[in-house]
Image (tube, helix red, strand yellow):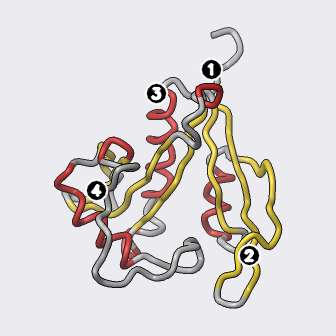
Amino acid sequence: MPVPFIRHATLGDEETLGRLDRVTWSPLHSVQPRPQPPYEPFYNERFGPRDHLVAEFDGEVVGYIRLARPTPLVCNAHVRQIQGLVVAERARGAGVGRALLRAVREEARNQGARRLTLRVLGHNTPARKLYEAEGFVVEGILPGEFLLEGEYVDDVLMGCSLAPPAGQ
């Protein structure tokens, strides 16, 4: 597969992103129940197109990443958090997740962030390996934080620095 094209989401992406979200739903990465009709809008008062980067192959959306401030606190304004990363099944293993992570890191820097964080379920080994390969480190674990399908699952907190290298 070619290198994915990464761009900011638009209002016109809402239906496509919502559908992608629903077809990729899994207890491997979601603590919410499986979405059921009538479906909630993908964009809402908290997250809109400005909070998403999308990946395309040949004009087809195959993934997205959501970037947000973890809190509204001024003292926390230097931190951005990845609050969703989805890749279509047919595009997995083609570098889409990696490309989205690299693009969102740059986007966070452009927004003035010095740290980038995320939360990942402890049993989501493929995602954890990708995050580690892209420079994220485990900064904390909340043991048994979620009860998913009868199993207690850890919530793993990961982060990386976006600070410029020393001397810059």
Residue lying furthest top in this view? 167
Which residue is under mark 1? 164
Q: Residues within 10 Å of mark 1 (few under 14, many from 20)?
A: few
The answer to whether residue 91 is left or right of residue 135 is left
Mark 2 residue type: Val
For the point 51% across and 28% down, the residue is 109
Q: Quadrant of residue 74?
A: top right
Which residue is under mark 2? 153
Determine whether the residue tagged by mark 1 lies in a helix, strand or loop: loop
> Of marks 1 and 3, which one's residue comes earlier in the chain?
3
Which residue is under mark 3? 111
> Of marks 3 and 2, which one's residue comes earlier in the chain?
3
Q: Residues within 10 Å of mark 4 (few under 14, many from 20)?
A: some
Q: Residues within 10 Å of mark 2 (few under 14, many from 20)?
A: many
Q: How many angstroms separate mark 3 from mark 4 (CA)?
A: 23 Å
Determine whether the residue tagged by mark 2 lies in a helix, strand or loop: strand
Determine whether the residue tagged by mark 3 lies in a helix, strand or loop: loop
